[in-house]
Amino acid sequence: MNLKDKVAIITGASSGIGEATALKLAKEGVKVVLTARSEDKLKELAQKIENENGTALVVTADVTKSDEFKNVVKKTKSEFGTVNILVNNAGLMPLSYIEKFKTEEWNTMVDVNIKGVLNGVQAVLPTLIDNKGGHIINISSTAAYKYFPGGAVYCATKAAVQMFSEGLRKEISAKHGINVTSIEPGAVDTALFETITDEDIKEELKDMKKMTTLQAEDIANAIFYAVNQPSRANINNIHILPSEQQ
């Protein structure tokens, strides 16, 4: 895909992987639409992008609400005329042991990590079909393949994203020329860990903090690699771990 002047919607763009991806794609000439619930942070990022001669549009939204995601697409098309790329990045990771029954956190993970992705595809896919091309990036995790302590629900949500991405690719890629990629990072230094409320999990994760983790920019570079391929080449999965992670 020639990325110059393409239009990308990025969810969870106010920090971490979303922010890094917005900066990377904007630098490569993509018009980026920044979506999250924190308007102030999005405006700060948009200003930074514009200061570097990039193009950014801020549209606040809660990805768990289908109507709000559709409004993001509506405003994007009103401003830029179309959508070419969707980066479904918004996610939460409040790890906890099942027997503690943090069911509110379970439900929130399902709503954001799974339903948020479904809402994004539902909102954007009709435009990509009309365009006869485009790219959908879904942020899954290496947790889709390997359980770790306290991660039963989180791992389940990321496995769902990975399998949904594969099903989506098989149904739409050949038929409509739309590429689909599941990005599957290991440990990344982002605010995800700040969503953990289980004190036992926090204690067990102290050893992980000794490891040199990935940075958000590493994932942004992986996303850029996927969307920068010619349309004939679909990068199905990118599985990326810190060198020290087993």
Image (cartoon, rainbow, N blue to C red):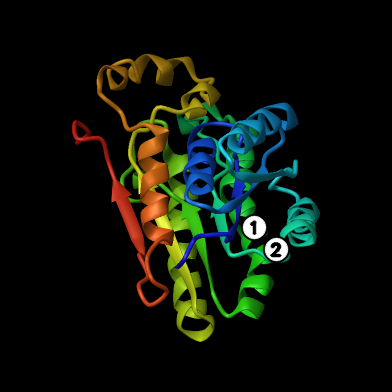
Q: Which mark is residue 123?
A: 2
Tag 2–tag 1 contact (CB < 8 Å)? yes
Q: Position of residue 133 (x, y in %)?
A: 54, 75
Type of residue at label 2?
Ala
Q: Is residue 58 left or right of residue 238?
A: right
In the figure, residue 243 lies in which quadrant?
top left
At a point 58% along the width and 29% down the height, the residue shown is 102
Question: Of helix, strand and loop, which one carries label 1?
Answer: helix
Tell whether 139 sits left or right of 219: right
> Dot 2: what SS?
helix
| Rendered location of residue 62, percent (x, y) | 73, 43
Q: Which mark is residue 25?
A: none
Farthest residue to the bottom: give it.
175
Camera-side residue of 214 and 79 = 79
Name the residue located 30 percent from the left edge and 28 percent from the top edge.
213
Residue 240 seen in the current view: yes
As measured in the structure, the alpha-carbon distance from the residue carrying label 2 to the one carrying label 1 is: 5 Å
Question: Can residue 183 be seen from the camera position used here?
Answer: no
> For this rendering, which residue is in front, 240 or 145?
240
Q: Nearer the viewer, residue 89 or 59?
A: 59
Q: Position of residue 19 (x, y in %)?
A: 54, 36
Q: On residue 120, which mark appears?
A: 1
Task: Give the residue type at disc 1.
Answer: Gly
Left-right relation of 206 to 79? left
Question: Going by the image, does 2 lie left or right of 242?
Answer: right
